[in-house]
């Protein structure tokens, strides 16, 4: 009986309950932290089957020891995993970093509390609302508050003793109407705290109490003929209702809810978070996660939910999701299908998608290597390829009413045109306008030459055309014994269908797909390159015919003239003596007389 390896011994000792496992390498450095409903079953799966993804295979080869922590529930494992990842920063985990620089709104723990923005949290009993994802949001809220409620901005110690002693005098803010003078006892503590409570509710997204209070005040002023004061209160009501209309996106009954959605590609995931209070979005944030081990969307979303709720100190008891994932036991999970709740999910998805588009635009400029790697991985997945298509070639035929048939081959490397590798083909073996036979000829000629010269073959060949042109190209690959060694697809123009060999049902890629855009760019570039060559050939034919139309001047004479004079224009301008030097005096006279 063979002895167990050290890893197998460690696995056999693992419990079957929920917990967190940690993988370490030969130097004792942390490689990976993961959670499991069943520790023994989950950890064993790394070693009992062939891993599909290369990164996971590399990880498993490096594992030399395993540690674990048992917890009561899977929900506890989720929270512990999140904390350990941030603390230990394992190489093969997605990176979760705390961000201490988000702005907050502080209601200071004072007798007459100040309300102001801050990026520092001090444990002094003050209330902090946030964090907010942008200072612009904070300023907008504080400007609203300032327009509605006169609060002090000074940092005086407004104790009863100091106010009673007359230590302070009202400042300019009082005379401007921005403060009611609590420093001189002109505003009671109860009245001031009533204002602060209204502000607290507005920050939370609840406008009901403030609106009712203002409307009551307005009616009281109007009843006692104080119309100027009533108008000022009316202006405040308008400001508040206008802000409420802009911030309320769904039914106000949707309160204290978090919305999470995820979109992902081959290398990254983007998780959008919306926080709802009384139908208003009070917070929005998108988290970008780089994949390390080809994690599923479910795994990444579960991790992100825990991280985001901790980061923003969310107290919501209900969350809306696209699909079920493992979350805290105390949370209610809703998967909306219709109505306002579903529209919130769609809004969150759009936010994630727009964020991804903006990031990709930035990456193209700031990190082209990352953009290329991600694009190649995306094309490999979308087109079901066995390897990334770093070298792609595209073929297109060009003829007008069967004249001067030509073909073009354009080459893209790492998703970009490699113009030095472009090639033109004059059709040699096909009579008349036969696109299928022409495609078969040029594909055979192209790869027969590459094989003879020992040049590298592309990972992907794109044929401009549908099933017919694709079948013709396949005949050439079969003849060269390249079937299966080079991936090949066809793209039909009408609906941009992608055809695969032997599959009658086409693939329809999303119109916004980067993969489709690269294929379209290839197709358009091949068409442009082919048309340009075709025009030059027709133009050359027209020039040649101008000389050949002269009686007694044949094709060989025209070739000799163009060889010596380079253009018809120079032939026309040449003296009879110069012409005679190339083709003899008899033919020189005919040409000279024709143009002079």
Image (cartoon, rainbow, N blue to C red):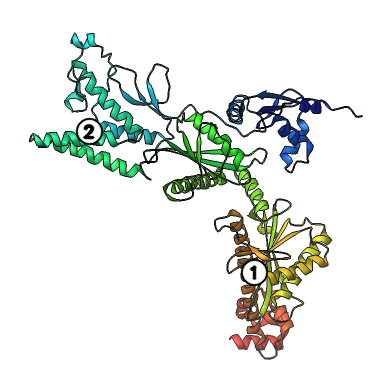
Camera-nearest residue between 49 and 246: 49
> Residue 481: which quarter of the image?
bottom right
Observer able to see residue 115: yes
| Whether residue 22 is situated above or below residue 255 in the rendered picture | above
Contact between labelled residues 2 and 1, with CB atoms less than 8 Å apart: no
**Residue closest to the far right:** 1
Quadrant in the picture for residue 450: bottom right
Whichever of labels 1 and 2 marks the residue nearer the N terminus, that label is: 2
Q: Secondary structure at mark 2?
A: helix
Density class for disc 1 (Cα within 10 Å; few <14, some 14-19, many ≥20) is many
Q: Is residue 64 visible?
A: no
Q: Which residue is mark 1?
A: 530
In the picture, which quadrant includes the C terminus?
bottom right
Measure the C-alpha gap from mark 1 to mark 2. 75 Å
Q: Could you tell whether 221 is left or right of 283 in the image? A: left
Q: Is residue 306 above or below residue 361?
A: above
**In the figure, residue 120 lies in which quadrant?**
top left
The image shows residue 213, relative to residue 182, as above or below, that is: below
Residue 108's disc is none
Question: Relative to residue 445, is residue 124 drawn left or right?
Answer: left
Q: Nearer the viewer, residue 215 or 165?
A: 215
Left or right: where does residue 115 sit relative to residue 378? Answer: left
Q: Examine the rendered structure and indicate whether residue 150 appears above or below residue 541.
A: above
Question: Residue extending furthest left?
Answer: 225
Which residue is pictured at 36% across the width and 25% down the height? 106
User: Where in the figure is residue 227, as x and y percent of width and height?
Assistant: 10, 37
Q: Residue at x 25, y 25 (%)?
A: 194
Report which residue position mark 2 lands on: 213
Q: Indicate the quadrant containing the N terminus: top left, top right, bottom left or bottom right.
A: top right
Q: Indicate the position of residue 308 as horizontal and vertical percent values.
A: 51, 33
| Helix, strand or loop at mark 1 | helix
């Amino acid at each position: 009986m063979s002895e167990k390896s050290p890893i197998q011994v460690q696995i056999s000792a693992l419990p079957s309950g929920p917990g967190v496992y940690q993988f370490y390498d030969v130097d004792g450095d942390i490689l990976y932290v993961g959670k499991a409903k069943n520790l023994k079953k989950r950890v064993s799966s790394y070693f009992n089957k062939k891993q599909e993804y290369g990164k996971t295979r590399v990880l498993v080869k490096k594992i030399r020891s395993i540690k674990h922590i048992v917890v009561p529930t899977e929900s506890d494992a989720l929270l512990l995993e999140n904390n350990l990842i941030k603390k230990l920063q394992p190489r093969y985990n997605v990176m979760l970093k705390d961000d201490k620089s988000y702005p907050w709104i502080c209601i200071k723990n004072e007798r007459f509390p100040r309300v102001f923005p801050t990026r520092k949290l001090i444990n002094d009993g003050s209330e902090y609302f946030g964090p907010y994802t942008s200072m612009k949001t904070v300023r907008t809220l504080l400007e609203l508050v300032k327009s509605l409620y006169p609060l002090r901005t000074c940092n005086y110690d407004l104790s009863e003793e100091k106010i009673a002693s007359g230590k302070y005098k009202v400042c300019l803010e009082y005379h401007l109407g921005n403060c009611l003078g609590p420093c001189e006892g002109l505003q009671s503590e109860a009245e001031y705290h009533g204002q602060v409570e209204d502000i607290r509710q507005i920050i939370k997204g609840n406008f009901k109490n403030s609106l009712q209070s203002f409307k009551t005040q307005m009616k009281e002023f109007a009843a006692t003929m104080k119309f100027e004061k009533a108008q000022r209160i009316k202006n405040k009501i308008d400001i508040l209702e206008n802000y409420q209309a802009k911030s309320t996106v769904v039914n106000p009954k949707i309160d204290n809810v978090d919305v999470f959605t995820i979109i992902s590609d081959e290398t990254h995931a983007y998780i959008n978070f919306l926080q709802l209070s009384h139908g208003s979005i009070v917070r929005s944030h998108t988290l970008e996660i780089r994949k390390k081990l080809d994690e599923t969307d479910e795994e990444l979303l579960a991790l992100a939910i825990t991280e985001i709720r901790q980061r923003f100190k969310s107290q919501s008891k209900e969350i809306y999701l696209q699909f079920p994932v493992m979350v805290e036991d105390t949370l209610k999970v809703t998967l909306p299908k219709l109505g306002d709740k579903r529209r919130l999910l769609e809004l969150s998805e759009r936010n994630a998608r727009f964020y991804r588009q903006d990031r990709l635009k930035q990456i193209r400029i700031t990190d082209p290597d990352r953009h290329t790697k991600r694009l190649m991985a995306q094309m490999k997945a979308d087109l079901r390829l066995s390897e990334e298509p770093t070298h792609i070639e595209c073929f297109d035929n060009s003829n007008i009413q069967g004249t001067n048939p030509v073909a073009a081959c354009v080459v893209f490397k790492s998703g970009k045109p490699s113009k030095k590798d472009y090639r033109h083909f004059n059709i040699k073996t096909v009579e008349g306008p036969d696109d299928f036979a022409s495609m078969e000829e040029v594909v055979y000629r192209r790869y027969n030459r590459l094989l003879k010269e020992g040049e590298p073959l592309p990972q992907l060949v794109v044929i401009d055309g549908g099933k017919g042109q694709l079948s013709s190209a396949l005949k050439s690959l079969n003849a060269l014994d390249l079937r299966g060694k080079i991936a090949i697809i066809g793209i039909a123009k009408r609906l941009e269908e992608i055809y695969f060999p032997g599959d009658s049902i086409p693939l329809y890629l999303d119109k916004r797909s980067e993969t489709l855009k690269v294929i379209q760019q290839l197709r358009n570039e091949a068409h442009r390159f082919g048309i340009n060559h075709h025009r030059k050939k027709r133009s050359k034919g027209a020039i040649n015919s101008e000389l050949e139309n002269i009686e007694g001047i044949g094709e060989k004479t025209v070739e000799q003239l163009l060889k010596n004079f380079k253009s018809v224009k120079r032939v026309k301008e040449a003296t009879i003596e110069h012409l005679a030097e190339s083709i003899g005096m008899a033919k020189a006279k005919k040409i000279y007389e024709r143009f002079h």
